[in-house]
Image: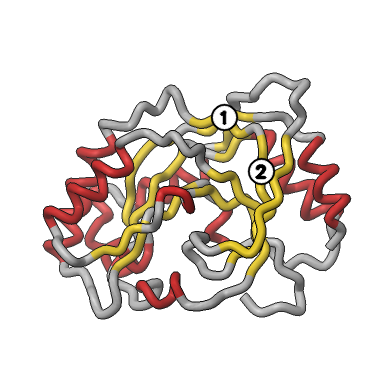
Amino acid sequence: MSVNLLEEIIRNAAPAKIFPIAFLIAWSGVPVLVYKGFPKSIINLKAEIDRKITGLSPENPGSKWPKTTLGCLKAGESLSDQDILVLKNICDEMSTKIDAYSGFTIRELSVVLIQDRTAERRLSTFKIPLNSEMEPEIDFEAKAVEKVIQEFEYENLSIYAEKIKMEGHRQSHYQQPYICSTLVYDLPANQPDYFSHFANVVDKALPGKYMWFHPTSRHITIRALIGNQESK
């Protein structure tokens, strides 16, 4: 992979606003903050990477809709139907606390070499600014996110619950050694307090179930930078 070409693609892209919309429980019980959609400039950037940089593996499904993974179930933990309903109620209530209009402004992206899937342990972080001469864009593509949100609605919860109950993606999955290069947007150090409020409410309702990732590791994955010959 050409680092210089990747840097050129990023530096030519417009800054953009990304807007949080809801808390959600993803497959295997993983709690995430979901955003309204990837900004159009980031979608174009991802397309440029796929078009111009040869040798990359196809994009993983998990980075095709914007989210910040907040934690995971601890080893040996599982969720009952009642637990899932409790989490659904918490997600809906805490989503009302999100200031969706302020959002985050993406002015730089980071090429990171992580040592585990939490992204808490990193071998390197190389920050690349987007085009500072352009105004931040506010347009975004919402279709992928709308599909995910719809699955988590009450009328679909009995079906979606089977995905939430899936094994895997527990503490060991995220903390075991895993070397991978990926392109991310790191959330700013000064983060809204709805993150900690959400974790506190979940811990109070389901004590001992979850491990939460450190705030400094919170990010939005743009794309994994893995070669075709490498295993996922």
Residue drawn at (51%, 41%) of the image: 187
Mark 1 and mark 2 residues within 8 Å of each other at the beta carbon: no
- Please count the marks in the image: 2
Give the percent coordinates (x, y) of residue 169. Answer: 40, 72
Q: Residues within 10 Å of mark 1 (few under 14, many from 20)?
A: some
Q: Quadrant of the N terminus?
A: bottom right
Under mark 2, the amino acid is Leu
In depth, the one of 124 and 206 nearer the eye is 124
> Mark 1 sits on what residue?
105
Q: Position of residue 71 (x, y in %)?
A: 36, 59
Drawn side of residue 214 relative to residue 206, left or right: right
Residue visible at 79% across and 46% down in the picture: 48
Q: Can you tell which quarter of the image residue 206 is in?
A: bottom left
Residue 96, horizontal then vertical, whole percent: 26, 32
Determine the CA span between mark 1 and mark 2: 11 Å
Residue at horizontal 43 percent and vertical 54 percent from the top: 69
> Which amino acid type is shown beneath numbered disc 1?
Thr
Q: Which residue is mark 2?
A: 109
Q: Within the image, what quadrant is residue 165 found in?
A: bottom left
- The residue located at (67%, 37%) in the rendering is 108
Q: Is residue 112 left or right of residue 142?
A: right
Q: Is residue 72 above or below residue 193?
A: below
Q: Quadrant of residue 25?
A: bottom left
Determine whether, in the image, residue 123 is placed left or right of residue 5: left
